[in-house]
Image (spheres, coloured by chain):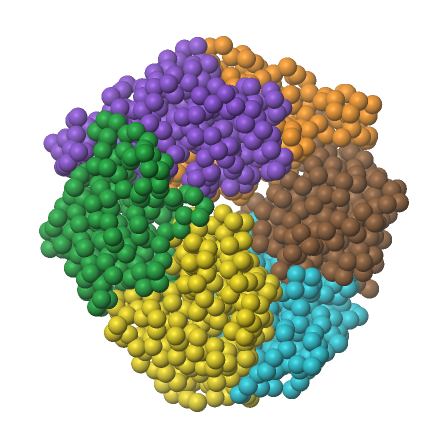
Chain colours: A cyan, B yellow, C green, D purple, E orange, F brown
Amino acid sequence: MKICVINPNTTSAMTAVISAAARSVARPDAEIVAVTSPMGPASIESHYDDALAVPGILRCIDGHPGMDGYLVACFGDPGLEAAREVADAPVLGIAEAAMHLAAPLGRGFSIVSTLSRTVGHAHDLVQRYGFRRSCLGIHACEVPVLELESNPATSDILVTSCRDALLADRSDAIVLGCAGMADLAAHISSEIGAPVVDGVAAGIGMLSAMAAMHLRTGTASGEFAAPPAKPYTGALARFGRPMTEAGVRRATG
Amino acid sequence: MKICVINPNTTSAMTAVISAAARSVARPDAEIVAVTSPMGPASIESHYDDALAVPGILRCIDGHPGMDGYLVACFGDPGLEAAREVADAPVLGIAEAAMHLAAPLGRGFSIVSTLSRTVGHAHDLVQRYGFRRSCLGIHACEVPVLELESNPATSDILVTSCRDALLADRSDAIVLGCAGMADLAAHISSEIGAPVVDGVAAGIGMLSAMAAMHLRTGTASGEFAAPPAKPYTGALARFGRPMTEAGVRRATG
Amino acid sequence: MKICVINPNTTSAMTAVISAAARSVARPDAEIVAVTSPMGPASIESHYDDALAVPGILRCIDGHPGMDGYLVACFGDPGLEAAREVADAPVLGIAEAAMHLAAPLGRGFSIVSTLSRTVGHAHDLVQRYGFRRSCLGIHACEVPVLELESNPATSDILVTSCRDALLADRSDAIVLGCAGMADLAAHISSEIGAPVVDGVAAGIGMLSAMAAMHLRTGTASGEFAAPPAKPYTGALARFGRPMTEAGVRRATG
Amino acid sequence: MKICVINPNTTSAMTAVISAAARSVARPDAEIVAVTSPMGPASIESHYDDALAVPGILRCIDGHPGMDGYLVACFGDPGLEAAREVADAPVLGIAEAAMHLAAPLGRGFSIVSTLSRTVGHAHDLVQRYGFRRSCLGIHACEVPVLELESNPATSDILVTSCRDALLADRSDAIVLGCAGMADLAAHISSEIGAPVVDGVAAGIGMLSAMAAMHLRTGTASGEFAAPPAKPYTGALARFGRPMTEAGVRRATG
Amino acid sequence: MKICVINPNTTSAMTAVISAAARSVARPDAEIVAVTSPMGPASIESHYDDALAVPGILRCIDGHPGMDGYLVACFGDPGLEAAREVADAPVLGIAEAAMHLAAPLGRGFSIVSTLSRTVGHAHDLVQRYGFRRSCLGIHACEVPVLELESNPATSDILVTSCRDALLADRSDAIVLGCAGMADLAAHISSEIGAPVVDGVAAGIGMLSAMAAMHLRTGTASGEFAAPPAKPYTGALARFGRPMTEAGVRRATG
Amino acid sequence: MKICVINPNTTSAMTAVISAAARSVARPDAEIVAVTSPMGPASIESHYDDALAVPGILRCIDGHPGMDGYLVACFGDPGLEAAREVADAPVLGIAEAAMHLAAPLGRGFSIVSTLSRTVGHAHDLVQRYGFRRSCLGIHACEVPVLELESNPATSDILVTSCRDALLADRSDAIVLGCAGMADLAAHISSEIGAPVVDGVAAGIGMLSAMAAMHLRTGTASGEFAAPPAKPYTGALARFGRPMTEAGVRRATG
């Protein structure tokens, strides 16, 4: 099976972290294809960045057909629904995947995210995915995304934030709120003595399960059928999908 | 007061319909500035279209500073949160505005939308905005957006769909689920004997109220403060915001 | 358009505050008719006061036909549903109106009310109107209604309460929880640097929008049709509605 | 123990039905005091009637001190919160009581009410009391309150309505939606082979339990403490409570 | 009427406390039959204990036919649904009963339980029964079940825990979270000045009401009909129910 | 990695079906250990069966230490919380696992179960796990568990039930509501053209993901720590856990 992991920001150093995390948990028979978005923000830390990361994600899917699953490796889960309309295989976001795996690990989990301005968006995802009972708190460690790697204090800050969250929320598990934290999950877990769920690994696990079961996004209700073909103009003209063949799945660009 | 109405698709005929609806209910002292998105889809009928309409909306806001309010005239309410981070005035979507005005008109309302594939997204907006108690049903009339104007049967189809929805849902009001239906609200209302809420008019009314009260998007929690400056690359490079002045609200492009 | 603002307590000094707030935001073509309840409590600070303010509200509507909207200017929103059955135009309460305008201004709002014994009732309104996601906290400043005007410290107390609420709840806006605070909204807003929503102004804005759109309470489900005629006896005998003409909207008194 | 059953409409024939239902289930050591409202509507079938029944209910409580419990025998549960502020003993409504007893009897219950215009209000009570999971449907039999006794077909209509509700909702029990149906519960139950809960009997049962446990309305949060004393004017002047003794529980009239 | 109170643990000293609490509030015409589980844990303080208490509860019901109601006297409400399938009369748990009686006593109640590891389970019961609005907090006093009687400090610890809970939650009533606290309700109530609801007494009151109304568990939906007969093997072989007569209610053992 | 799949009924033919389904999706490096409950019901079709299956499940865990995950293969998810307290590795139920994998496959899923009497319990699991938004309907095919294999019409009945559910609910995926249907998932999927999720395969996938990430049930809140040691008596005496070593995880039997 082949699983495509998309880094929806344009920072390739972060793609390397994500790719390593994905490979470390993959089935022996799984191939991980890691790609970096070709356009948009260098990191995703606002609704503005989140929205403008979506065109790049859609390009990545268009450029990598024939996969058994796509993982969008940003905790804001940008563009999942649009991606599901155009991908030939299941699409997961890392927030979604992490929460699905964390929920059965105890009474509930705490999310530890980067900047506090992203807490509201994480809260919306919790509501949307149905984890209001399981998510007992969302916390920010206040390290910006691109400093996670460069700041030597990141590991200590995260251990402290996670331990504090566990106590404050009376939770049983931690969900890491950024793809850039993927390489720290094992260390934090051993420090705090609690399960720590990284969404990149969780996403690979869930997509592998779906692939083994030959599951694809369902189109029976029509919502996730291929989008109607129509003209696109301006800087996004190449996102237009051919009008001659209704139902064709890939754009022309 | 000046209110900017953004048609987030690239079809200028639809901008004309929206603009007329906005002007028909505006305060005598309000100026309506109607703009058409400079890029993206010709109509919005899928999650794919919805996501790819957002860059154009953000361009429109950037190109029209100094307003007292911005109305995004597509019932999917695309890009509202990103828009709120960069706009100097309140931002509303027409779905949101229509539901806020319809809720107090009775026990509940029915939404009558275009294609059935958009029903799921409308359902998500209902949940998100808190109208689960008020929204008693969502129905599709199965007329595509760009046929609303051209199809001579549109008016009859909508009257029938709205009347059926009222009965099926035991509702007291109708919310029209597309900006392209704005010119039909009065006719439908007189035919079915029930209040019919068009989101364009509702949005102008709510933004006028906000403007008269000098209300702006709040930034105290940080979530809707100006997005952090950072590099943008590729086809979206011009969306990058200058890195030298933190907090500057407009992009450079 | 003509909008009737009802002060549901019997204190005419408070009617003056409310009336001024209403006029300050009204459209140039709107006439504001401010009326004081002819019976019941001098201020509304308990469920008992709230319930006994309703007959006076219904009298005010009965005595002022021909309006384009009615605003009930008490944050407990007393008697809205009964009023909707008998009024010829839409009816709003100020709590309802304030929350509808405040919700789109950010992640969420805090309510700052008068006495702590009213917090539970405000909580119920939040739930009923669907603002559980948007309302992040309800706080009491512990100034009784009729002291809001007379107490020279009111303004400072409110500024402090609102600033504290914003921080404690991580909210982006304030909703003022009493009609008697209407004249303080602008001052508080400039002090705390966040949008402050007064329900009287919000109600005028929403009713003006409804009037411009020719919206009325819907009666299709029957719930808000005119109440069945029947005998009334005792001290409330004059509230009986004539039995000879089913559907007549006004009482005889 | 003494339990006061209040008929909040002014029709004494209905008080007799209610009183008999109450006595048929009372403990041997319980005294039932049945009273008829001295003012307001002859029956309660609208929000207007519901609101204007409250002053009479409060008069009944004021006129019958020294009880161990008060039951408000109208399915709209009018005025419960105001009543709790002024009564020296617990106060229940029959809708509330019926739902509390019906919930543990199976997967869920159906409510069968009088006129369809009251269905919305019953729905609100279900939400408010927390029975959204248990209440599987609300149905109207379309017999007006005062015809329940006089119409010879009432019994057959109700049996049919209840049987249909059970099937349509896949429910396990019926809650009767009007105090005037109290005398029919046993007959309907034997006809449809399912438990049928009359709120009058349920209320007597719950208040007896509370009395045996010496439970009273709690005042720790302040919400249900005696209402602040203040002037009342006009037709409701006698509802004013003396200003000289804070905390005195009964009005002066 | 005869009501069977089941102590689902095997500690007969606790049965005595429960039995006394039940008798102290019973109707003069009610007979209380108190039984101790014949198998399983000596006290119930974990999900493991809770699950393994159920066979004993089912044995108790099987061994005591002809009752008008069964009360399961453990705050975890173990086995209620299985019990309802096999009992000839209504079945209540003490958590359920206590919450139904406490909800109408004010704005909301606090639960004070034994060990903190049980708080999560109590939270689930609150959600399941629909008391999310009424239950304002759940607290542990950290006294193990079997020390409630023997520890001389229990009473003081509970008074302090209950008083603290009332303040922290701004609640109006206390629900005691263990059958072993039944004898302390009156003392705690007089110390803290707020209603304290013991589930044993509450359950007797609700079952007495149901018995007086001749209510039984409904079987119309089929969920609570007698379980299908089938072979049982191993240590639980005697729980098998005879296969020859479908619908027979009692097991063979 | 080693994953233990527990058939909680005593029918070994069903264990074979479950075991094959598990092996067909397992990672190449995973060992599947399939075990049959040593005691209790031959199939699980009521709350009574469900409750009495739990002791056998706990025996299976106790008898198979050293695993990396345990899957309870009955759609009622019996005994999960008790199992989590005593197992050294994560524990999943098949209902839970199926819903976690099905939710991201579209707008929502339908559950197709065996007998209609189990629909209520499935509904409770949906609520508990947070899938109220995703689960659009629950349907019974009315084939008893032990006839799934023997009845030659099972496959056709299920195809029809699943196709009908998809249309009636406007859903995008099917969740199979019984472990005994595991071998039919692929056939049904190809017949109806929609993803069909079998919980046994889903559970193996999720547990494999957890094992690869070294995740275990969290014990930080204390709820899922080893149960307190205490005496057990009667037929369940062997479930008692030794009192000398607090925290020992396995029972003595």
> Would residue E167 be found to the left or right of residue E221 on screen?
left
| Quadrant of the frame with the N terminus of chain D | top left
| Quadrant of the frame with the C terminus of chain D | top left
Q: Residue at x 83, y 49 (%)?
A: F156
Q: How far across and how far down the image is residue A113, in percent?
A: 50, 66
> Would residue C14 be found to the left or right of residue A136 on screen?
left
**Which of the pair C246/C169 is nearer the observer?**
C246
Specify the quadrant of the image occupied by residue E188: top left
Specify the quadrant of the image occupied by residue B46: bottom right
Q: Residue at x 72, y 30 (%)?
A: E227
Count the marks: how many? 0
Q: How far across and how far down the image is residue E133, in percent?
A: 43, 42
Q: Is residue E1 above or below residue F184?
A: above
Q: Is residue B3 above or below residue C143?
A: below
Q: Is residue B81 above or below residue E29?
A: below
Q: Is residue D29 above or below residue A195?
A: above
> Would residue F69 be found to the left or right of residue C147 on screen?
right
Specify the quadrant of the image occupied by residue B138: bottom right
**Which of the pair F180/C70 is nearer the observer?**
C70
Q: How far across and how far down the image is residue C92, in percent?
A: 31, 52
Q: Residue at x 45, y 35 (%)?
A: D115
> Would residue A215 be found to the left or right of residue F120 on screen?
right
Q: How far across and how far down the image is residue C119, in percent?
A: 31, 46
Q: Is residue D82 visible?
A: no
**Which of the pair E69/D190 is nearer the observer?**
D190
